[in-house]
């Protein structure tokens, strides 16, 4: 960064934001940022939809091993058939995918609270039995760096990651929504959230971060159609005396409130997630990032699906569209 730094009075970098992270020149002066559709804005990126889904690793294994038609798995994959059709009909230009790393890119030696992938590509991680046989994830470095610039200047501290592999937390949602293509249908910006090592971010912090991401997207002066995905959950606990815990009532109430009253849902404390949804249920705070990035007006519910069990985990799934 140059000593001059960004221009005063703006929290939004211009497009071409890759230079913000990697260039001594810093962002240009006099940046003008208005929301999508604002006065003077001819072309701007916009978030049109959000996707929410569990990312159970065994789902990825079932896909990779050709077990999707087996009686145990068939109900799970049937629930995503409408989503795959919707995805083909509403293909975005970029997916901003919120997930958590499972000791693939990060470890207990270093776990950033929020990390944004700014690389040109992200390879499938080897999680102990070889990488999944899925395509390499193509990134969107310029757009990712722009988002990082805007969000950091909105006082959210992000870690910039220019090289990392991505595990089932990111690739399973892509497989559920896109099937088994030779290449993923569009670039993806990985956004990793720490929900493994306490302290983890609060639901409110995640929800407000989503709003900052929306602002960053709407400041980008390229006409990109962006989807934001929140992944993880739903209720499950993988260890201890409560291993195998699933709470249908909590999960469905969470889905209801995520749609209709996310502001209140964002206030839910960590202990409620852990007590009601199990130790791994805390992953659901990541869904609040995607929900916060949606418009303030009520969304259109395109698809809702819930199924238990899938490898000792409750599978939840939503697609929400912004109403134009």
Image (tube, grey):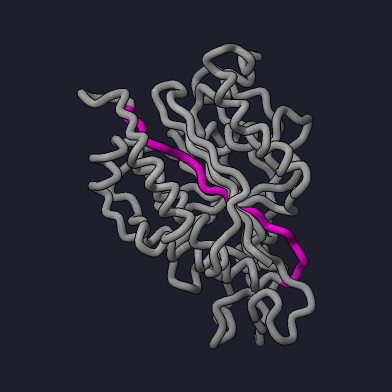
Q: Please state which of residues 8 and 33 is positioned toward the viewer in this rendering.
A: 33
Is residue 313 found left or right of 30 in the rendered image?
Answer: left
Is residue 105 found left or right of 175 in the rendered image?
Answer: left
The magenta segment:
221-237
Q: Is residue 102 above or below residue 151?
A: above
Q: Is residue 143 above or below residue 54?
A: below
Is residue 132 found left or right of 244 in the rendered image?
Answer: right
Q: Is residue 149 visible?
A: no
> In the rendered picture of this protein, how many numbered marks are placed on residues?
0
**Residue at the spot 55% in from the left edge and 68% down from the top edge:** 297
In the image, residue 80 lies at what x, y percent? Answer: 62, 33
Identify the image quadrant of the N terminus. Answer: bottom right
**Residue at the spot 55% in from the left edge and 26% down from the top edge:** 76
Q: Is residue 21 above or below residue 67?
A: below
Q: Is residue 172 visible?
A: yes
Identify the image quadrant of the C terminus. Answer: bottom right
**Residue at the spot 36% in from the left edge and 35% down from the top edge:** 248
In the image, residue 160 lies at what x, y percent? Answer: 53, 56
Q: Please state which of residues 264 and 217 is positioned toward the viewer in this rendering.
A: 264
Where on the picture, by quarter, is residue 279? top left
Q: Please state which of residues 25 and 87 is positioned toward the viewer in this rendering.
A: 87
In the image, residue 238 lies at what x, y percent? Answer: 33, 26
**Residue at the spot 52% in from the left edge and 15% down from the top edge:** 72
Q: Is residue 133 above or below residue 271?
A: above
In the image, residue 223 lies at what x, y percent? Answer: 77, 66
Q: Is residue 231 one of those drawn in magenta?
A: yes
- Residue found at the very far left of the displayed protein: 241
Is residue 6 found left or right of 276 in the rendered image?
Answer: right
């Amino acid at each position: 960064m140059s000593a001059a730094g960004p221009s005063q009075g703006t929290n939004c970098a211009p497009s071409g934001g890759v230079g913000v992270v990697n260039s001594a020149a810093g962002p240009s002066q006099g940046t003008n940022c208005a929301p999508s559709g604002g006065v003077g804005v001819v072309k701007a990126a916009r978030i049109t939809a959000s996707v929410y889904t569990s990312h159970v690793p065994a789902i990825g294994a079932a896909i990779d091993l050709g077990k999707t038609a087996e009686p145990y798995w068939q109900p799970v994959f049937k629930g995503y058939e409408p989503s795959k059709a919707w995805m083909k009909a509403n293909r975005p230009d970029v997916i901003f995918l919120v997930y958590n790393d499972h000791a693939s890119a990060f470890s207990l030696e270093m776990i950033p609270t929020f990390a944004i992938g700014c690389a040109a590509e992200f390879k499938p991680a080897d999680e102990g039995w070889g990488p999944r046989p899925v395509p390499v994830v193509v990134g969107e470095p310029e757009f990712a760096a722009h988002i990082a610039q805007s969000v950091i200047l909105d006082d959210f501290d992000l870690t910039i990651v220019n090289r990392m592999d991505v595990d089932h937390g990111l690739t399973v949602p892509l497989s559920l929504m896109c099937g088994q293509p030779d290449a993923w249908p569009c670039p993806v910006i990985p956004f990793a959230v720490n929900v493994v090592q306490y302290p983890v971010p609060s639901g409110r912090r995640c929800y407000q971060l989503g709003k900052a991401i929306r602002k960053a997207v709407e400041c980008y002066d390229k006409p990109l159609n962006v989807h934001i995905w929140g992944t993880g959950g739903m209720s499950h606990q993988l260890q201890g005396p409560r291993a195998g815990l699933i709470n249908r009532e909590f999960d469905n109430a969470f889905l209801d409130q995520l749609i209709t009253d996310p502001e209140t849902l964002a206030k839910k404390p960590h202990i409620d997630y852990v007590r009601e949804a199990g130790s791994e249920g805390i992953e659901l705070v990541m869904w609040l990032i995607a929900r916060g990035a949606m418009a303030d007006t009520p969304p259109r519910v395109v698809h809702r699906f819930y199924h238990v069990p899938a490898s000792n985990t409750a599978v939840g799934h939503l697609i929400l569209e912004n109403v134009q």
